[in-house]
Amino acid sequence: MDETSFKLLAKYLPSTYVQQAKDARNTTNFLFNQLLEKRKWPEEGWSERDIEILLDELASLDSNNFLKNHGVGEREARIASSLVAKRNFHLGHGLGRSGDLTEVQPKAAGSSVLYQLTNDLAKDALRTLGVPDVKACFVAPLATGMSLTLIFLCLRQQQPKARYIIWSRIDQKSCFKSITTAGFEPIIVEPILNGEELVTDTEKIETIMKQIDPDLIACVMTTTSCFAPRACDDVETVAVLCKIYRVAHVINNAYGVQSTKCMHVIQQASKKGRVDAFVQSTDKNFMVPVGGTIIAGFDKCFVSKISQCYPGRASSSPIVDLFITLLSLGSKEYKSLARERKQLFQLLKEGLAKIASRFGQRVLDTPGNSISIGISLPSVKDPKSLTQLGSQLFLRCVSGTRVVSNLESKVINGHEFRNWGAHHSNYPTGYLTAAATIGMTALDVEQFLQRLTKVMESWSTKTIPIVSPSLTNGHDGFTQDLLTSDYLVDQESSVI
Amino acid sequence: MDETSFKLLAKYLPSTYVQQAKDARNTTNFLFNQLLEKRKWPEEGWSERDIEILLDELASLDSNNFLKNHGVGEREARIASSLVAKRNFHLGHGLGRSGDLTEVQPKAAGSSVLYQLTNDLAKDALRTLGVPDVKACFVAPLATGMSLTLIFLCLRQQQPKARYIIWSRIDQKSCFKSITTAGFEPIIVEPILNGEELVTDTEKIETIMKQIDPDLIACVMTTTSCFAPRACDDVETVAVLCKIYRVAHVINNAYGVQSTKCMHVIQQASKKGRVDAFVQSTDKNFMVPVGGTIIAGFDKCFVSKISQCYPGRASSSPIVDLFITLLSLGSKEYKSLARERKQLFQLLKEGLAKIASRFGQRVLDTPGNSISIGISLPSVKDPKSLTQLGSQLFLRCVSGTRVVSNLESKVINGHEFRNWGAHHSNYPTGYLTAAATIGMTALDVEQFLQRLTKVMESWSTKTIPIVSPSLTNGHDGFTQDLLTSDYLVDQESSVI
Amino acid sequence: MDETSFKLLAKYLPSTYVQQAKDARNTTNFLFNQLLEKRKWPEEGWSERDIEILLDELASLDSNNFLKNHGVGEREARIASSLVAKRNFHLGHGLGRSGDLTEVQPKAAGSSVLYQLTNDLAKDALRTLGVPDVKACFVAPLATGMSLTLIFLCLRQQQPKARYIIWSRIDQKSCFKSITTAGFEPIIVEPILNGEELVTDTEKIETIMKQIDPDLIACVMTTTSCFAPRACDDVETVAVLCKIYRVAHVINNAYGVQSTKCMHVIQQASKKGRVDAFVQSTDKNFMVPVGGTIIAGFDKCFVSKISQCYPGRASSSPIVDLFITLLSLGSKEYKSLARERKQLFQLLKEGLAKIASRFGQRVLDTPGNSISIGISLPSVKDPKSLTQLGSQLFLRCVSGTRVVSNLESKVINGHEFRNWGAHHSNYPTGYLTAAATIGMTALDVEQFLQRLTKVMESWSTKTIPIVSPSLTNGHDGFTQDLLTSDYLVDQESSVI
Amino acid sequence: MDETSFKLLAKYLPSTYVQQAKDARNTTNFLFNQLLEKRKWPEEGWSERDIEILLDELASLDSNNFLKNHGVGEREARIASSLVAKRNFHLGHGLGRSGDLTEVQPKAAGSSVLYQLTNDLAKDALRTLGVPDVKACFVAPLATGMSLTLIFLCLRQQQPKARYIIWSRIDQKSCFKSITTAGFEPIIVEPILNGEELVTDTEKIETIMKQIDPDLIACVMTTTSCFAPRACDDVETVAVLCKIYRVAHVINNAYGVQSTKCMHVIQQASKKGRVDAFVQSTDKNFMVPVGGTIIAGFDKCFVSKISQCYPGRASSSPIVDLFITLLSLGSKEYKSLARERKQLFQLLKEGLAKIASRFGQRVLDTPGNSISIGISLPSVKDPKSLTQLGSQLFLRCVSGTRVVSNLESKVINGHEFRNWGAHHSNYPTGYLTAAATIGMTALDVEQFLQRLTKVMESWSTKTIPIVSPSLTNGHDGFTQDLLTSDYLVDQESSVI
């Protein structure tokens, strides 16, 4: 509706009502304009209705929604199914142009604005949540691993001789594959055992940096959020080393946005040392469906180069999901959820400690991990019995636990990993992990603890603990079981 | 509802109605089961209602929708916004596992089935539409260019020494970038002028193959669908050469699925020679929003390797869009649309011929291009006047035309292209192109022709044609104009 | 978005794109403004997207959607469920005020405009479809029968002594109940047999008018659309009589809007005689869910009085459905569907004639019915066998046929009807009817004829026709069967 | 999906996942079956997703959604617009048959079950919320006033001689019109002034009962929820009188379900005396859009008769809204909202008392009204200044206040009401009312009090209070102001 519409409405309504309605509309427009002007994550969440209206408004700026448009190009964003059109708010042109993900599309002004706004909101969210110095970011419709690959490919363009990536081991296949898919050779630095916790072997990283020509090293990759008993990497020290030895530094902050600790170390690292880019998954941190990441950095120019590496137009769906969610929650609600998560982490820890002690076990002491908690499991003769623990939990509708038996070896892209899953070749005990992540409720914790207790009860009566402290050989029967057993359920979903 | 529900309904309804209702339900279930069993693209389209019910059913199989599920992992597909949840049919887990896009996800049985079904439907669609010998494919939530990059990265893993990709020049930035982003060096083979048509220089390709160690060549990349006056590449001959010289062959079939011709040459190429993979965009061929491709091939194992290269879980949104659209259209409706496109191509050609002759120009003779048509433009002193032609059309709500002045040079990733946009360093004339693509209507053609006539009329009176046949130097004023002028509108959207 | 928004967009987009987007928006606004100004049923249908945007715009004018509104009344249109809010486009205030359905609501300017627009569209639709002289109408969220009741109650207020309604018998319970619920006594005028057709006994109507004090007669009620072999009432003659004898005349035009004939007789009646109001169902004529009627008339003041009789605010849902549908179809598409209906009526008639003759029966000759067709059925000993015919069709997914055995009597509100269902105490034969209504497809006719043939085949072999021409007594076993048998399926759905 | 589907899924998934998925489905089915079996308002609310799935399941039982159905009746629930189809969950057949709103429809088994379930839930809700003895109810798609009319029409059928309805005056037009539209004559019993509160004049009611032949009295109508300073009627005493004098008793419980007090008096009245029916609005009590009521009673047979009076099929939209909302909230959430309302009533009262005392006014003492609160206003010379108070609040986005100046007389259907709006011919002071209703938030109260303070401040400076205690004549200027002033905003929306 425009001025003319309101004049026409005077035929239908007393003038005071028309004025009132106009005022109300202006309030909504004011809301939109504030967003367009300030480009900040609003504190108060918006109603779904206002979000939908804004999306409709933006879609109206795309040529495929022009009433009189006729397209004679090869790509005119025609949408065959009205069901598809609706779920995409009639946005059909995706993101970016062939040259650059973040470039404006002539045919799709609305989509282009939407993408810029989402990137602005995402940047403000990262700043608000603990990395105030972040300079630029963009939301990529890619998995975390694929986003890392894209960054690595971008680094190659800058440093054509590079062959290696120094990698602080984390047993998550995507992390490893992000290196090999990009065509690099990983130099694996196993974390060291500090008490029960696995921490970054910064000494070894430095040694490698000293030994190898920096031109041959594409970057060091560290990881913040991870499964216990691995701790958040010592990204500050690594950043300092990277600065000294002039090596790029890429941080996998997969689900670290929800943790003030993970965010804080990135901010510190950027101050003291070198951080070229850090990547976070949108689904794990912002409760949207899987499919996007925020690729961020402290150098606008480098972040822009990454976005220029993506050849072609990309799906705007993950961007739309994030845009809606950020507006819908607002920073206030998000922070409140983040605080709740922190409280539930304590609740979970205490609950697990009680259960563990009842069965002669303990919560692993991992002060460096603010999200995931492990409890030790008894040594068993047959690793299948550990497997069964996970399976039984899954069948009782507990998802997300992870049982590590320390018995498996795995070969990925030619590299052998002893005790795959444990982040370490020789972790002294088997264990089960659980995590407190954003969006979790007290009921989730309560139900999990109840069901775990029941499963442990029935399981402990069947399992005879054995004395030998640790088994380091893989068992044949074990790997065959992977596809159907629950063991695997979260085995590989750890980081990305 | 289950058997018990129907028993309970007998308290509400006479038994005959209950029976009738049960029968009706069985009919719907039969529809679903046929799909699950046959894994074929149905001939008759489904109603949106049936599609939505099936999607709901599948989503019910994902753990985040289990009524009593409690998640303690780091990724539990919690969806914060109900608006987001609904537009994604409550599917939150995305595609694949860290190891492989096509792997089954334990927490997301429904999503996994959905993805397999979509891949099955896509394969059947490719078969139905002209490539009956295709062996495997998967839908990737990636741009066409990024999909090509993924294939190239996969080829590197198989052939670690490879450095080059032989590329039959097509002036679309994404195509070129797909090579450089993957870290390869392009060997550019410019098409040769055959009359007014630009055709593949197969001789030069063979010469290169002879000269360079095949281990150093990752592949040859050819393109089917493209803007006139470039023709569909001679993929058959290239395929034969690739077979002889043991070089991989990747075909960019960006929007070729809608053209029986493009599909036929791929089928023939696979019979006579070597085709490792061919890629098609989902948006351009199947009228869904931008964001996906079908990566297909004739060797199941190689296609599977490509999907294993993607590190991490990916967005299922482009898959959902394609799934809905394929079911909604059915093959019958799609074929009918494809036939209509063919007819509109003729209509467009005839209309353009009339307009061209009126202004002393001609339709370029390009029998090898079944989608795009070019008409020559007069030589002008100031290239801006050509620019204006495009701008004026866009301002009159005609999108998708492309004006090529043959005056621009461009440097992309260090490679200089003379006459960027023309696929050729020295094309003899400026021209304007338009395309007939699937989903176009007779009204689109009619309106375009009308508006073009008007624009040409006003334009021709202002423009004084000059005699000099061709200008080969870039004009400074020209490139500065790019951002605001319509010249650019489709300049770079040509192929991908 | 407003002017300020577009200024702000210049930070995101080149100015030409902003201008283009603004132009596009203006085109949409122009569409809305034309509707607001002309208040006519558009010829071309609108896209669902434009309809939804307009509904959103209108809803924004209601106080419950004002961003800063705080309500302290007893009715503030709060909507608890977001699912409910969405399906109602956030419209919560319903229609009208306590005084009058069509009055403007201060808190709900948007809803009020929506209702006025719908009434305007409905009026224009009635005019366009054959009653150009209609002066006023409103859409009531009431069943046809209840709408008639409301009119009768309004007539009582004008004529407090009135006790009777003269009613040209039609065997549809709602019609009859509309009289008794309003507290009037029906004077039943049975149609007379003209060949095989049942036509209005206008002579008897006149006789009654002469005998009874006109102050005691609230009105005559006639019916246009009905099941064969009853014809459309002779509303013209009745209208003339009503004018002469100063008796009000109310026409039940339940599903007559789709028939040019029914509309024509109403227009003629209004010219030659007296028509106080005529009522049409929205669902049957405009393919919306059951729930509304258009109450129309030739005297603005009387129509307004009817709307003032409704005490309270009413559901806007049926209005929203009609508004969407009228805009979505446009008059062009509607007329095309109406023409198709006419053709299918012929197709159905011919098909039924073939089937009838094959089984020794005939299509009943009813030139006065343009929607429904009857074929005679053989006389049978046991009426259950006729019942089975209907049941078997329903079980084969043919809905809407109606089998009349001429054997039942029924007492409704104290009045006994011989041969209830046949509109006549003594119709000479049993029969089956089928109708061609708007929205029907050729496939519907084809499938019906096929299935009818099959059912008749199996049925005729079991049934031995008997000679006695007509049975006039009800059968005990028959009525008991009503609830479960298909006989009933459409027995009572005939007119309203 | 059925058993066969799950067998087929084994081709896609490991068997354990299939089993897990089946179990999850069974949980959902169990939820549905519990509802079907127990027919009770669930304590815990359902997710929107589960509600939508159940609605889809029910819609699948309606013949218009049968995959192979072909309709040849006059009403086949074809839905032209897919937007309309979706918002109605593809339910097209409405409610009831011509004979009875609550009768099962053969073509619409699903709709029929839905209606029965909604009526069951509504009955259980009334029982849970304070009227445990209620025997039957049905949800009518009618305004409260129209529902009362329907009840009165039903009473006429039982008592054909009845002419009068005894009415405890409440100044809400719909209430009054419900009587006159039904064709009855109201005997108006003005409430008496008890302190500042207006209470039922039961003595006068008894006197009338004694004087008039009970056969001539259709019923007494009392009202529970109303605007202060009127109190909830003394329905218990009236009920006792009705029992003694054998007069029917109908209670308008418009928005009383949210008040334990209103519900309690109905329950008590039914125990001690006679209550034939009581009516409550669905929108005001259950936060759905305007459009429905629950008509309830203590005699199954009488309630059934009322539903049989509605001639024709009715809109199911208000039923769907209520069904969704009851399931979505669950009784637990509803009770919690009701408790919150009670607290906000106190908050509002205290806040108003502070403001009132600041401006030399007071909160009217009305212990018999648990929802609405009045504060006195100064006597003014020009009633327009009172009008302005309301207008200014409305312009500041406070809706729902009601200013009564005690100066207006109104003639409705021939009856003159002195001081219309005040429920009394001679209330001693002007006042402003505000109400605390379900769904209100603390922010609503806070903002209202703030804005009221501001408006009073600016208003009091302009208004010079005069001494003369009460003006009893209407002012001409006043009524002319009605359309544009806020005075009217809620003037007439008071009760229904």
Image: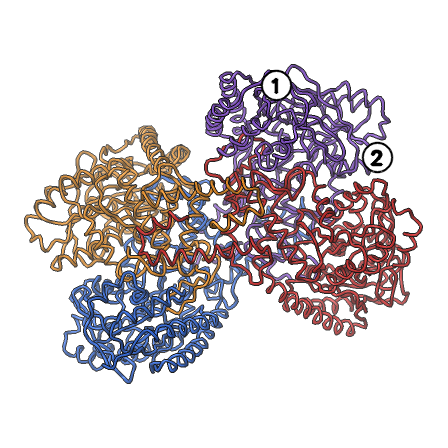
Chain colours: A orange, B blue, C red, D purple
Picture residue at 57% right of the left edge, 25% below the top = D432
Q: Which residue is mark 1?
A: D366
Q: Find residue A414 and report its image quarter.
A: bottom left
- Chain containing mark 2: D
Q: Which mark is residue B366?
A: none
Give neighbour class at mark 2: few <14, some 14-19, many 20+ (Cα, 10 Å).
Answer: some
Against D355, residue A202 (above or below) is below
For residue D138, side relative to residue A333 (left or right): right
Name the amino acid type tagged 1. Answer: Thr
Three-letter residue code for mark 2 = Gln
* Chain where mark 1 sits: D
Secondary structure state at the residue bearing disc 2: loop
State which tag comes first along the sequence, 2 or 1: 2
Q: Secondary structure at mark 1?
A: loop
**Residue in front for this viewpoint, A201 or B93:** B93
Q: Position of residue C473 (x, y in %)?
A: 89, 55
Q: Report the side of D237 relative to D54 (left or right).
A: right
